[in-house]
Amino acid sequence: MRPTVLCFSGLDPSGGAGLQADIEAIGQSGAHAAIACTALTIQNSQQVFGFEATSSQLLLAQANAVVNDLPIQCVKSGMLGTTENIQALADFLKSHPEYQYVLDPVLVANSGGSLGDQATLVHAFQQLIPLATIITPNTIELRALTGLDDLELATQKLLSMGAHAVLVKGGHEATADYIRNALYINGELISETTCARLDGEYHGSGCSLASYIAGRLALGDNIQQAVNHAETWLFATLKNAESPVVGGQKIPKRF
Ligand code: PLP
């Protein structure tokens, strides 16, 4: 069986983000996706109307059901919804130090809607940071996690909080025609990649990127290879993204 990524992520009915993005991205990376569902959200490509989080007991029961059943090589987390779920994931990861772990520190949807109480999530994320093989914050999440505005200082602070590797995604910065991502491993800037900024906004781009990285790690790539593969793949999915009927955020075409 293909190496498996176990995702802790939420359901987005639009299919753009969340666990559907994870399944599609990981499938495209060549790995198999398993899901422990953290929350059922109510949203479309334009806005989040609400969500109901899974209890931490149910979340762990889902994850534990597949632990000895599937060849899990990597865990990936996206929306976790509550501090209880973050604590449960931290406990799960501590009891499985053999798993690689991709932490996408989701705080809000790209549409701006709440996916949990930001202050409590930021605080709880601190315990996941040292457990991660790589963390993939956008610059809004990076600033929120560190409380610092300057990106270089914020990245250094995140690294000092125990992050092994960090991919800082520059899509929310005010660069008009390009996007720059920066990869840090073991405290060092390893690479900076720049791509053209495509028109419009995209729903689920962060989930897709982090999941593809997780898939490639599960298949044996090192961190830099996994990130390079994922960035190239994501760009194509955004270039081919599909526009919803009423003009919401575009949905990456992952096939
Ligand atoms: N996870 C879920 C369940 C979501 O609904 C969202 C956004 O709506 C996200 C994660 C984050 O999405 P993005 O990749 O657009 O940051």
Image: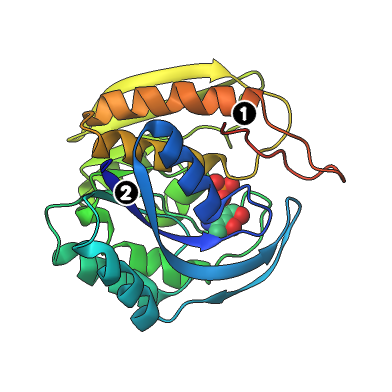
Q: Disc 1 versus disc 2: distance between alpha carbons?
A: 23 Å
In the picture, measured across the screen, residue 182 lies left or right of residue 3, that is right
Secondary structure under tag 2 reads strand
Cβ of mark 1 under 8 Å from ligand 1: the answer is no
Question: Residue at left 73%, top 56%?
Answer: 44
**Tag shown at residue 149:** none
Q: Is residue 43 above or below residue 45?
A: below
Q: Measuring from the top left, give residue 226's x and y in whole percent.
A: 31, 29
Q: Are there few (<14), some (14-19), or many (20+) residues within 10 Å of tag 2? A: many
The quarter holding residue 221 reads: top left
- Location of mark 2 (residue): 5
Q: Amino acid at mark 1?
A: Leu
Mark nearer the N terminus (1 vs 2): 2
Q: Nearer the viewer, residue 205 or 170?
A: 205
Q: Are marks 1 and 2 in contact (CB under 8 Å)?
A: no
Total numbered labels: 2
Quarter of the rendering occupied by the N terminus: top left
Q: Measuring from the top left, give residue 20's x and y in whole percent.
A: 54, 51
Secondary structure under tag 1 reads helix
Q: Measuring from the top left, give residue 99's x and y in whole percent.
A: 18, 52
Q: Is residue 133 above or below residue 56?
A: above
Q: Are there few (<14), some (14-19), or many (20+) residues within 10 Å of tag 1? A: many
Q: Nearer the viewer, residue 64 or 44?
A: 64
- Location of mark 1 (residue): 238
